[in-house]
Amino acid sequence: MILCRVLLTAYLISQARYALLEIALQHGVSVASGVAKEAAIYLHAGDGGALEQLLREANKQPDVIAATVERDGRTWGREISRIEGFHPRWFGGMPNAFGDAARLVKADDHRAIETRTPIVIHQSSDVLSDQTAPGLSLEPRIVGHAVVIVSVERIFAQMDALVARSIGVWALLLGAGLLAGWLISGMMVSPLKQLADSARVWTGGVDQTPSDSSALATHRDEIRSLWGSLTAMKHALDRKTHEVARLQGSFDDAVRLHTADLQDMNRRLSDIIALKNDLLLQVSHEVKTPLTALASLVSNLYDGVTGEFAPRQRKYLAQVMATTNQIKHLLTTLLEFAMAETGRIHLDRRVVDINVLVESALDVLQPFQEGRGISCVVSESLLGVRVVADPDRVQQVLLNLIHNAIKASSPGSTVVIDARTEGSDLTISVRDSGPGVRPSERATLLRQPLPSESRRHGGGVGLYICRYLVELHGGRIWFESEVGNGATFYFTLPASEGTAVSSQSPNRTYR
């Protein structure tokens, strides 16, 4: 009878330990699965900060020693300095219900269960959405592992104490007989009550149902009390799991809602920008037409079509003509800017002589050039050079660059227009002798219009339009400048077949 009690006690201790380890294992697997699911999102998004915050929250779970994420040799979270396998001395090894997903380890000399859950990302799918584009195949890919270490030190400590007491009891039973056996049975059952109390602590004070409690109080069944505590622990873990799933669902719904709001705001912003550009086009066009008629009338008056004017009247008419032309140029630039923003500029490509376009631009700018006292030198390398481009748009680029160069140069200096071939492209350059481009303006000079207070010698909307027109031809535009040594603006155009640049003849100077 004593031997039967000894064997029964050993069996109960073993089963109790298995039950406690299995519950601790379920706790670790639950935490690791939650970490793996959210870590897949953060790894896919490259959000290391959110991943670290997730691991800090996981480390706050009951009895969690460490929660880490491993990927390609890199580890996030709190690392354990030493982890080694651990095999208990009493009654077999680790429960194998979860296969290789868990093992008993010693982490920094603490007995624990290490659970390892793969982090899976589905390729060709949106991690944050449950929707997948039709026709795309989803191939799960393991990109790392979520590792959670849950302490079982209390379980083994109590088990070790229980085993030690049992050995003492067995020795006492051999010499004390039936009376000693009765005492030993009481000593063996009392640790089970301690295990039940520990299980209640794990569940946060959750007790059994009133019917179970009354039954336990009536029959004083310690084993059933332990089983009830373990069952309560399992129910508490299930409730926590459901709560985590509910919170995850709420988070996904909030992300989808905010994404829809952002998309709606983007659509509204696009509509507002389109309306703004259309209004700009209409206003610029409607104002430009009567302004052109006004300029023509003023020009006729200045030319004496209606009769001669006094010198002072002609002076005022000249000022009116200059102001009108300036407004026309401004409206033209504004119209081009709006067309560039809306993408409504279309090219009429054909083979054109670049030298003809340069001379035409210089003829238009001759009054401005003479008023500034600037000499324009055209290299002979432009003779006979042909490009495939829209002549009106290329002349607009030349007018802007040469006008800016004349404006930037000091009186009596020289502006040089040159060209060279580079493969299938022709590179045209306009060099001035002005103060150069400010370092603070270089990064954005060609990328966006400068604010009015930053403009100096041009560099406003005109250069922005030049960049757009050159890139529309498939070319590129850039500049080189040193403060105090002037600036050289370059742009490329596709050269016509058979074009060859020669630089052996003398340059031409326009004054």
Image (cartoon, helix red, strand yellow):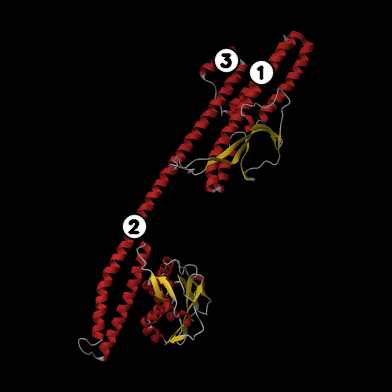
x%, y% of residue 269? 36, 55
User: How packed is label 3: few (under 14 Cα within 10 Å), some, or many (20 or more)?
Assistant: few
User: How packed is label 2: few (under 14 Cα within 10 Å), some, or many (20 or more)?
Assistant: few
Q: Which mark is residue 375?
A: none
What amino acid is found at the position of numbered circle 2 in the picture?
Answer: Ile
Left or right: 404 in relation to 151 = left
Dot in front, 3 or 1: 1
Of all residues, the one furthest to the right in this rendering is: 175
Q: Residue beneath label 3, please?
A: 217
x%, y% of residue 342? 36, 62
Classify mark 1: helix, strand or loop: helix
Dot in front, 1 or 2: 2
x%, y% of residue 274? 34, 59
Q: Residue beneath label 2, please?
A: 272
What amino acid is found at the position of numbered circle 1 in the picture?
Answer: Leu
Of all residues, the one furthest to the front in this rendering is: 498
Q: Earlier in the sequence, mark 3 or mark 1?
A: 1
Residue 436 seen from this side: no
What amino acid is found at the position of numbered circle 3 in the picture?
Answer: Ala
Q: Earlier in the sequence, mark 1 or mark 2?
A: 1
Q: Residue at x 66, y 30 (%)?
A: 152
Classify mark 3: helix, strand or loop: helix
Task: Give the CA distance from mark 2 to mark 3.
Answer: 75 Å
Q: Residue at x 36, y 73 (%)?
A: 392
Q: Quadrant of residue 395?
A: bottom left
Q: Up-down: is 276 above or below 110?
A: below
Quadrant location of the N terminus? top right
Q: Residue beneath label 1, please?
A: 12
Q: Residue at x 24, y 76 (%)?
A: 293
x%, y% of residue 452? 40, 71
Q: Residue at x 57, y 35 (%)?
A: 31
Q: Quadrant of residue 32?
A: top right
